[in-house]
Amino acid sequence: MTVRRARNPFRFESPLEPEDLIGRGREVGWLVDAALERRVVSLAAPRRYGKTSVLRAAGRRLESEHDVVVAHVDLLGLADAEDFAARFGSAWRRAVAGRRRLRRQLDQLLGGLAEVGVTVLGSGVQVTRRPAREEAGVAAVHALLDLPGDADTPVLVVLDEFQALHAAWAQGEGVLRSHTQSPQQAGRVAWAFAGSQPSLLAAAFSDAGRAYYQQALALPLGRLADADLAGGIAEQFRASGREVGTALSPLLRLAAGHPQRAMLLAHALWDATPSGGESDNARWLAALAQVRARVADEATGVWESLSPAQQAALRSVQRHGTATAAPTSPAGVSRASRQSAQEALLRRGLVEQVEVGTGVTGRRYRPVDPLLGDWLDQRKLGG
Ligand SMILES: Nc1ncnc2c1ncn2[C@@H]1O[C@H](COP(=O)(O)OP(=O)(O)OP(=O)(O)O)[C@@H](O)[C@H]1O
Ligand SMILES: [Mg+2]
């Protein structure tokens, strides 16, 4: 008899299906309401906090419960205006696949754009660069960006990894803005800009872009609550024939609410727990060793990319909650240098300020990635 091994239920490498999300009910509900009100919203959070998963869950609900056309455009690694046209066109094509009128309208438009290099490719759209017609890509973008305002149903356009737009195409924000704020679209089409904090807000934005961006309603996406994680992890263990047992506490302590790190740890713990069994301290330690081995290369890469002052600042943040704790440092890095290095770490999204209640003196910081913090602890680097 063959025993079918249950599949590990904890995913950590890609956006989740809506039904696998732990917590986030409030955020998804907020996005749904904002889209129904045709708002322009922004969602900025550190890497791997679940931005794309939350947007997908909201999109799925808008499509199935409210008949909204949802186009999800991923701008990660965007190259230029032509690339934007191709990605937007492909996302729109997928979004309107089941809607005859919109599909026909898009096909007609694409027919007209063939001479500027826009063609249908499989289920998407491709744009071929023609050096003699540099404006072709921009013209295609304008034509495509008109489509959402023409739809006879409500529309949500999601621009994920939005910070890539300015980096790849300096005029892109202005072009986009001319459409989202046009009388044809304003108040008719909902837009959501998502990206990694803090780069979404950082210097990459032109002044005009920043002003525009700041008009968007911002949805904060923080860490997950321990109670939600505890419930979600225990439930998924149980549903796959295991009990999470006493290992749950150290797991939650280390993950500190970081969504992807919690899932990575839960995945390893599940692997270390036999079918029908319960995890305990020994299994937790086995899982932890696995995860530490897995993240070591990434942590080393991050560490080696830092200047000596940034390394000293990061060590100090992990140990003392701030880079400026000690007046002097064994590594010989002055307090002022550690202070500016801490700012650089904040800008890079490696360190974040910890939300503290009122009455606490001094700001506290922590590494965004608790496993980077753990890696530092393990290495027992001086400082
Ligand atoms: N609500 C959640 N419940 C459980 N796991 C989550 C949740 N949100 C995020 N995760 C974990 O984080 C991983 C990354 O999620 P997702 O890709 O949506 O994040 P992201 O913020 O878009 O990441 P990136 O910055 O890489 O684009 C998921 O594979 C999952 O392991
Ligand atoms: Mg994402």
Image: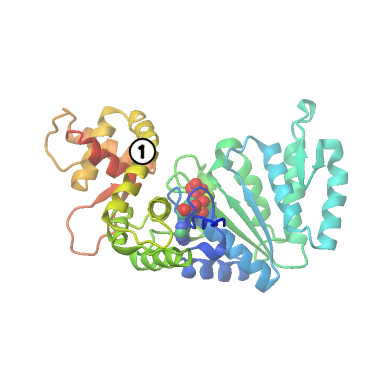
Q: Residues within 10 Å of mark 1 (few under 14, many from 20)?
A: few
Please state if 296 lies on the left or on the right of 19 as rendered. Answer: left
What quarter of the picture does the C terminus occupy? top left
* Furthest residue toward left: 327
Q: Nearer the viewer, residue 317 or 146?
A: 317
Colouring scheme applied when the structure was drawn: rainbow
Q: Residue 251's x, y, as percent?
A: 31, 56
Q: Amino acid at mark 1?
A: Ala
Q: Nearer the viewer, residue 44 or 238?
A: 238
What quarter of the picture does the N terminus occupy? bottom right
Identified at 17% across, 28% down, the residue is: 331
212, above or below 338, in the image? below
Q: Which residue is mark 1?
A: 293
Q: Residue 8's x, y, as percent?
A: 49, 55
Q: Nearer the viewer, residue 369 or 110?
A: 369
Dividing the picture into quarters, in which one does residue 184 lie? bottom right
Q: Residue 26's x, y, as percent?
A: 47, 70
* Furthest residue toward bottom: 65
- Indicate the secondary structure of the residue bearing disc 1: helix
Q: Is residue 211 visible?
A: no
Please state if 87 lies on the left or on the right of 25 as rendered. Answer: right
Identified at 61% across, 59% down, the residue is: 191
Please state if 300 lies on the left or on the right of 174 as rendered. Answer: left
Q: Residue 192's x, y, as percent?
A: 58, 57
Identified at 24% across, 39% down, the residue is: 378
* Furthest residue toward front: 1
Q: Is residue 291 visible?
A: yes
Dividing the picture into quarters, in which one does residue 324 lie? top left
Please state if 34 lies on the left or on the right of 122 as rendered. Answer: left
